[in-house]
Image (cartoon, helix red, strand yellow):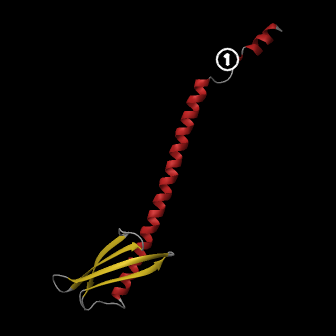
Amino acid sequence: MRSFKMKLLNIKEKGFSLIEVVVALFILSISVITIYNLIISTSVSTFQLEQKYLAKEVANNRIALINTLEKPMKPINRKGEMVMGGQNWLWEEEINKNITNEFYDFTISVKLENKNEYTYITKGFIFDE
């Protein structure tokens, strides 16, 4: 009976010490913060990729129009807007004669309506027929 009472009173040897609990909580909190930062950076990166993709599609639409319906006959600068993905995109085209006069160089810049910097810029050539 006495050994049973000793085992009951010997509480110090059972469980974790305060330092062990604090260290475990510290490690857990560092892990949670790291995972949270990973989730935040992934969602920001996904948003930026979506914006770049939509801007590229606006530029591709402009290239298709330049090659078909709106073929340039002379150097020209054009501006316009297009709705893509529920957002208003502004595009600017700069079309110039190439040095050899066989091609037109074009630059298409695309940005969101209320932004100062361009989301996507592409350059290319069109054969002068």
Query: 126 or 119: nearer the eye?
Result: 119
Q: Amino acid type of disc 1? A: Glu
Query: 102 or 42: nearer the eye?
Result: 42
> In the image, is residue 86 above or below residue 15?
below
> In the image, is residue 22 above or below residue 86?
above
Residue at the extreme top: 2
Which structural element holds mark 1? helix
Q: Position of residue 74 (x, y in %)?
A: 24, 90
Residue at 16% over, 83% down: 100
Image position of 7 (left or right of 55): right
Q: Local crowd at mark 1 within 10 Å, few (<14), some, or many (≥20)?
A: few
Residue at 55% over, 43% down: 32
Quarter containing the C terminus? bottom left
Residue at 19% over, 82% down: 98
> In the image, is residue 3 above or below residue 60?
above
Residue at the extreme right: 1
Quarter containing the N terminus? top right
Query: 1 or 84: nearer the eye?
Result: 84
> In the image, is residue 66 above or below residue 33?
below
Residue underneath mark 1: 13
> Which of the 4 quarters of the picture holds residue 91?
bottom left
Q: Position of residue 78 (x, y in %)?
A: 32, 84
> Which of the 4 quarters of the picture holds residue 72?
bottom left
Q: Position of residue 120 (x, y in %)?
A: 36, 70
Image position of 29 (left or right of 10): left
Q: Position of residue 60 (x, y in %)?
A: 39, 78
Image position of 118 (left or right of 25): left
Image position of 73 (left or right of 36): left
